[in-house]
Amino acid sequence: MTTVETPLSPKVGRGRRRSLPDNGYRGMLALTAIVFGALAVWFLVAVILQAKPAFATLGVGWIFGGTWNPTHGQYGLLPFILGTLEVTAIAVVLAFPVGLGTAIALAFLVPMRVRPALSTTVELLAAIPSVVYGLWGLIVLAPVFRDTVEPFLTSAFGWTGLFNGPNNGTGLLLAGVILFVMILPTMVAISRDVLIVVPTDQVEGAMALGATRWQVLRKVVLPGSRTGILGAFTLATGRALGETVAVAMVIGNSPYIAHSLKSSAATIPSLIVNNFGESTGTELSALFGAGLVLLVIGILVNSAARWLVWSTGHQSAGVEVGT
Amino acid sequence: MTESNSMPRVAETLTERTERALTEAPAGEVVMTLRDVAVSFGGHTAVRNVSFDVCAGEATALIGPSGSGKTTLLRALNRMHDAERSARVTGKILLGDLDIYGPESDPTLLRSRVGMVFQRPNPFPTMSIYDNAVAGLRFNGVRKKALLDEAAESALIAAALWDSVKDRLKAHGSTLSGGEQQRLCIARALAVEPEVLLMDEPTSALDPIATKRIEELVGELKDRVTIVIVTHNMQQAMRVSDRCAFLLMGEDKAGELIEFGPSARLFSEPSDPRTLDYVNGRFG
Amino acid sequence: MTVLIDTPPDPIVERRRAVQAAAASSLKRRKLGSRVALTVCWLFLAIAIVPLVAVVVYVISKGLPAWNVDFFTKSTTPEGVPGGGVWNAIVGTAVITVIGTAVAVPLGLLCGLFLTESDGRIAAALRFTADVMTGIPSITVGIFGYIAIVHNFGYSGLAGSFAVGFIMLPVIIRAGETAFRGVPRSLNEAAMALGARRATIARKIVVPTALPGVITGVLLAIARGLGETAPLLLTIFGNQYLQWNPTKTMAALPPLIYQYSSQPYADLVQIAWGAALLLMVIVLVLSIGSRLLAVYLRRERR
């Protein structure tokens, strides 16, 4: 295939001969890119088209209706939107400090010798399928929550009103905690990556001024990687928002707005996965509409996350221009 | 190996200094004492047999070919090797009468007394020029605004940066040129008012004009702070230093102190033939 | 020699005293703060490790007892009928993943090559799209698979392959691009100077040099695709019987775990644990294997 032309071959011929296959090659690459772009557009358009009937018959406001009762033609998504936000909030409120602390420990505190092994372990755990976490949450953690965690929280923090109702084990709290465990590796892995790119000379510069280890981290390392950490946090949030099966397995799946952290609830993904098989007509279209809402949220959150992670890349490159 | 008459003088000054708690010493008096200092990493010795005195109000240069352990030795003087688990520093290093590796010494406190300027300018990119200048003071628990302002201005003036930055103290440190950034780093170190300032090849990343400014600065700063400077450039060592320590890599790759003495003598009539070789080799 | 005490006050000396006094008096507080903060970090590390390790330990201890010859050779049995295995689900997962991979890998790698060789606005938009798509909720991809395939052709293994491939595609694109971009420019330019065509350079230099990274990325994408549950729940319908034909409804491991986990029968839950262990082992073998392979290939090259 390789034709190395002799210097004597005429210029025009050379140009032609080389440009033709190059065009073919470029054309092939461009074609695959077009296929990918078309797939992405088709994805979005298909979901919008299928959700359209629901918007047409129910109006735009149906999304914020408070009741989901298909037999009475009520398709309000508010309980599921709230449920999604609530479990995500529980997960990220736990995952942010724990993930950041873990990332700091993995990047700076753990002895050099075990650092790579431990970091790899955490990254590997990010690859465990969510259904496995869901199974563990349902079979192992739910009884523990019902018999130990929830009674304890109720007696200790019952006055806040957050823990009213019976101890079910499954519910908002368990779903949030399972999500926390699931998004933790994402949070840790990305935060660690952005923490370790903070240049050593800045760490040493702070050390040489008499800063303690924590002062170095707090005043130099963390501010330097603020955007990247925010990006990690946002990506983890995106993962929590979109998680389906693990949440569906442990949240109890009730179509009502939860009044307590122990209540059963449902999220947009769990709504879809639980009702998809039996739905037709407007209900099916409403489920597509719910999917569209989720998709739009997912696109927004992930765009924000990517933008944040990218901009740290550019920022740290700018810092390098020291001399 | 070391300057012949240094031992008795050190003993004498040490006894004097124990009687007073003052941290400053008059020009010519010993502020740092190194005795048989060696640094090793995981059993491999990087530099050893180093004994000399650093005198107040002077600039002491550490010279030698690369691999002779100049930077390693310098970083031992403010315990920068503490972060490296495998590093071991043996021998005695005294700051005044404080054994800096002794039980009385705290590395963070020590570093506020022995500042450091690095090879590459490393201002904190997330901080403004002002915040950079007072970063060390804040690390050390200084909260009084008046003191911060006063120290920042004094340090920036001393680093010959005040005039060009006084109107944009809130701007980011990264908006400065390379030479200005390095002077900001010097100001940052000076603001803490250390007794000794360690400079690790501070001009190696700078262009000739910026280098000249930093060299001039070293001369001006000597009244304020005692300087120990590592340089690979012998002309620079001659221009800026009062005394000079020449290190050379031994056969087992460990750096050793070959000769220590006043720079003028060391460069003109070194007592060790190896110093002569090095000096002549460099000057062609 | 104690003359020095009477030295007239010098502003620098004054300030030095003030700074050192502040440093000394705040030292205890600063060190305590540092120790507390770092201890909290250690504590969080422990909090992070414990549940993650607990998941692995539980899945192994509960799943291993389910592993026997029947588990790997027999198909699932109807509710209430004891015994049976997950052979049909293993076959389903394998067929669905292989087809999804076979389509997504070439398409994704060529796309990655396109992104490597182009720096325009279109490339940037595609790159961003791929990045965003890696984080999109997988259930929405299930919906897409349903609309695109199931709507027209009914539930089938192919619909599942479509969804799984669609999830793997952006992962492969970005992994491929990262690997291709890692190829030193000098190699490219040297070949260009010899008059080689771009296609030749790609085939003979860029792709082989980037191979370790490409393989790692592909294996990780497969690991990701294998474990997806939600998209399959909307596309393959499930099948109690062994089915090799991807145009028919199929069983797969993740939906099987999902469905059996909430069954009241202990033997079905046991099978769910066994399947979870199997899935976890495959995914971890792929993830660890990809890393080891990448390290090995890079070492070979040197």
Image (cartoon, rainbow, N blue to C red):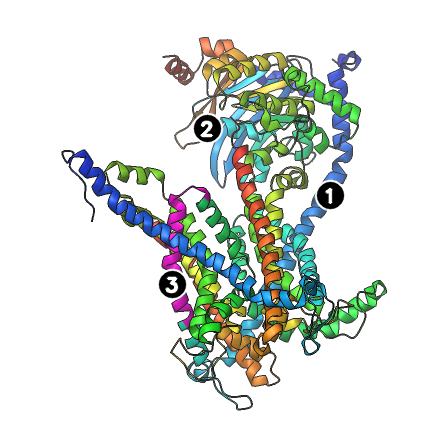
Do the CB atoms of the residues marked 3 and 1 lie less than 8 Å apart? no
Find the magenta span and give its range.
C96-121
B279 w.r.t. B43: above or below: above
Residue at mark 1: chain: C
Front of the two marks 2 and 3? 3
Q: Give the structural element (helix, strand or loop) at label 3.
A: helix
- In magenta stretch: residue C104: yes
Q: Give the structural element (helix, strand or loop) at label 1.
A: helix
**For the residue marked with disc 1, what is the amino acid?**
Gly
> On the image, numbered disc 2 is attached to which residue?
B255
**For the residue marked with disc 3, what is the amino acid?**
Val
**For the residue marked with disc 2, what is the amino acid?**
Gly
Front of the two marks 3 and 1? 3
> On the image, numbered disc 1 is attached to which residue?
C33
Q: Give the structural element (helix, strand or loop) at label 2.
A: strand
The disc, 3 or 1, on the residue closer to the chain's N-terminal end is: 1
Q: Which mark is residue C259?
A: none
- In magenta stretch: residue A163: no
In the drawing, does residue A145 fall left or right of residue B247?
Answer: right
Residue at mark 3: chain: C
Dot 3 crowding, Cα within 10 Å, few <14, some 14–19, many 20+: some
Residue B109 in sight: yes
> Rounded to the nearest whole Å, what is the CA distance between mark 2 and mark 1?
39 Å
